[in-house]
Amino acid sequence: MPGDIVVEDTKHPITKGLPARWHRSEEWYAFVESVRGKPGYHVLASADEKSYTPGPATMPGGDHPLIWTHCAGNGHVVYSALGHAGFMYSEPLMIQLLENAMGWGLSESGKACK
């Protein structure tokens, strides 16, 4: 279903080249709770639940993170809830996101995780 992604950190290497508001069709996964505010988690983008009808996939308070970074032990992690159909991986902005994420991961390799 079509909706909007709001890129919250436009200066992060993972979001480089992405629009501040990204309209696309997606299967909007929801989570039991938001990662926002959890120690070590950094939300990069979230769903604007007002831009579509989330139905049972509504997040508490409408806070719906979709892309974030965090540490797992000494490893740097990026999580994205995007891309639930194969054709989505041919979209230029999705390719940009994945290329950025891989580049960020390589740049963080060997660095201590905070």
Image (spheres, helix red, strand yellow):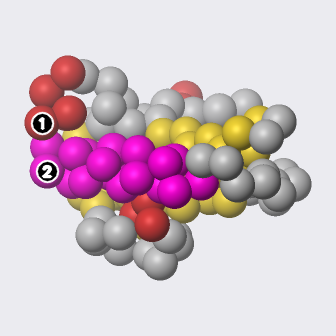
Q: CA distance from mark 1 to mark 2?
A: 6 Å
**Residue 108 x/y as whole percent:** 59, 54
Q: Residue furthest front?
A: 110
Q: Describe the element under mark 1 as helix, strand or loop.
A: helix
Predominant secondary structure, magenta span: helix
Q: Describe the element under mark 2 as helix, strand or loop.
A: helix
Q: Which residues are magenta?
A: 91-108
Q: Is residue 30 magenta?
A: no
Q: Residue furthest right?
A: 39
| Image mark count | 2
**Residue 32 x/y as whole percent:** 73, 31
* Residue closest to the eye, 90 or 7: 90
- The C terminus sits in image quarter: bottom right
Residue 70: mark? none
Disc 1 residue type?
Answer: Ser
* Mark 1 residue crowding within 10 angstroms, few (<14) / some (14–19) / many (20+): few
**Residue 98 x/y as whole percent:** 33, 44
Asked whether residue 101 is in view, the answer is no
The residue beneath circle 2 is 92
Position of 57 with respect to 6 (left or right) is right
The residue beneath circle 1 is 90
Position of 48 with respect to 44 (left or right) is left
Residue drawn at point x = 14 percent, y = 43 percent: 91
Disc 2 residue type?
Answer: Pro
Residue drawn at point x = 50 percent, y = 70 percent: 12
**Residue 35 x/y as whole percent:** 74, 47
Based on the displayed image, in which of its 4 quarters is residue 96 positioned? bottom left
* Residue closest to the eye, 25 or 20: 20
Q: Is residue 98 magenta?
A: yes
